[in-house]
Image (tube, helix red, strand yellow):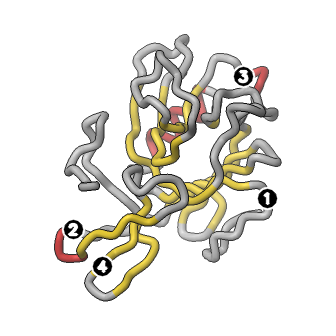
């Protein structure tokens, strides 16, 4: 595959570098697929740093956000039900989207991720992509109830959009997390 300079939603492409081998960078990318690295030449990119990390706990139904290794915020979430489970692994935020329809199925806000799953929803332009997005079904927060995405309430959706940049690493796992970088349990 070939990384475009823009995502399917029009954002500038930003991918986290998770490994270096000589002149090559191993990146988390939608093109590489779940839990696989894509390799890009170091000479083809501009590197920037982000201290943000997002951890989604399937077992605890909680999202933990850290900055600089310190927990900043914890959010209740609702992840995928059996048959539409949320994929686990290391992913990245690819796009930050405002829906303009807070009462709709994706609430106010969407953080599209590089994660994919077999289930395809016809009303979601992202196809088989997984996202962290707001929901009007806040009674379901704290237990699996989604088609694979991680749901949050609108207030948390707004907070995520304001703080979490594209390219932020996202770990989705059963606890404990094993990212090797001081991730919260």
Labels 3, 4: front one: 4
Reading the image, the residue beneath label 4 is 24
Residue at 56% in and 16% down: 105
Residue at 30% in and 34% down: 9
Q: Earlier in the sequence, mark 3 or mark 4?
A: 4
Q: State the SS at label 3.
A: helix
Please tell me how crowded label 3 is: few (under 14), some (14-19), or many (20+) other residues with Cα within 10 Å. Answer: some
Q: Earlier in the sequence, mark 2 or mark 1?
A: 2
Labels 1, 3: front one: 1
Reading the image, the residue beneath label 2 is 45
- Nearer-the-camera pick, 32 or 148: 32
Taking 32 as reference, is 20 above or below it?
below
Taking 56 as reference, is 99 above or below it?
above
Q: State the SS at label 1.
A: loop
Say whether residue 96 is left or right of residue 11.
Answer: right
Q: Earlier in the sequence, mark 1 or mark 3?
A: 3
Reading the image, the residue beneath label 3 is 138
- Verify CB contact (< 8 Å) between mark 3 and mark 4: no
Q: CA distance from mark 3 to mark 4?
A: 43 Å
Q: State the SS at label 4.
A: strand
Q: CA distance from mark 2 to mark 1?
A: 34 Å
Q: Earlier in the sequence, mark 3 or mark 2?
A: 2
Reading the image, the residue beneath label 1 is 175
Q: Quadrant of residue 179?
A: bottom right
- Nearer-the-camera pick, 129 or 111: 129
Say whether residue 9 is left or right of residue 33.
Answer: left
Pinpoint residue 167: horizontal percent, then vertical percent.
Answer: 40, 55
């Amino acid at each position: 595959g070939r990384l475009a300079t823009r995502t399917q939603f029009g954002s500038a492409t930003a991918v986290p570098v998770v490994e270096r081998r000589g002149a090559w960078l191993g990146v988390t990318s939608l093109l590489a697929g779940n839990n696989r690295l894509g390799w890009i030449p170091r000479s083809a990119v501009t590197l920037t740093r982000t201290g943000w990390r997002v951890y989604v706990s399937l077992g605890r139904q909680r999202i933990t956000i850290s900055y600089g290794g310190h927990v900043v915020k914890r959010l209740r979430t609702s992840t995928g039900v059996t048959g539409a489970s949320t994929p686990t692994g290391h992913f990245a935020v690819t796009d930050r989207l405002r829906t303009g329809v807070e009462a709709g199925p994706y609430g106010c806000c969407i953080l599209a991720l590089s994660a994919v799953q077999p289930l395809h929803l016809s009303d979601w332009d992202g196809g088989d992509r997984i996202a962290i997005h707001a929901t009007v079904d806040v009674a379901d927060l704290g237990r699996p109830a989604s088609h694979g995405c991680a749901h949050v309430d609108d207030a948390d959706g707004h907070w995520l959009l304001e703080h979490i940049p594209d390219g932020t690493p996202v770990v989705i796992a059963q606890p404990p997390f094993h990212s090797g970088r001081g991730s919260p349990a």
